[in-house]
Image (cartoon, grey):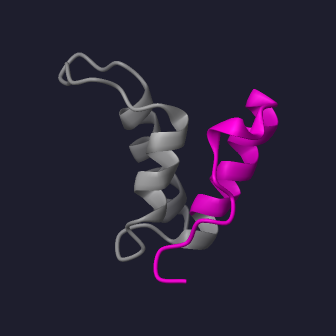
Amino acid sequence: MSAHIIGICDSFDAMTTKRPYNQKRLKSMHEAMLELKTMPYKYNYKIVEALEEVVREIKGDQRYFISQYREGN
């Protein structure tokens, strides 16, 4: 479980922050969350939801997220 949490957080961070090895356009927080949510075979949806809640609390702005979006539902 710990490895899944760290993997999801690292993926989110890699998509939203500049890294020396990646010069591509960064994703917005909303885009990054959507990408995590649309890959249930790779990312545990419950952990992604928990990350979304934490980021939402930190940012204090719910406009960045689509809470009810679920792939296949």
**Residue 9 visible in the current orientation:** no
The image shows residue 30 at horizontal and vertical percentages of 54, 41
Q: Position of residue 32 (x, y in %)?
A: 45, 43
Does the stretch in magenta take in 50? yes
Q: Tell me which residue sits at (35%, 69%) in the image.
A: 42
Q: Quadrant of residue 20?
A: top left
Q: Quadrant of residue 48?
A: bottom right
Q: Is residue 15 left or right of residue 66?
A: left
In the rendered image, the quadrant that contains the N terminus is bottom right
Residue at position x 37%, y 67% from top? 39
Q: Nearer the viewer, residue 46 or 2?
A: 46
Q: Is residue 44 above or below residue 36?
A: below
Q: Quadrant of the C terminus?
A: bottom right
Percent x, y of residue 69: 59, 65
* Residue 2 visible to an observer of this rendering: yes
Task: Give percent across and percent down for residue 27.
Answer: 39, 32
The answer to whether residue 72 is above or below residue 27 is below
63 with respect to 19 (left or right): right
Residue at x 50%, y 71% (from the top left corner): 44
- The residue range painted magenta reads 48-73
Compared to residue 58, the image places residue 65 above or below, namely below
Q: How many marks?
A: 0
The question of residue 15 being in magenta is answered with: no
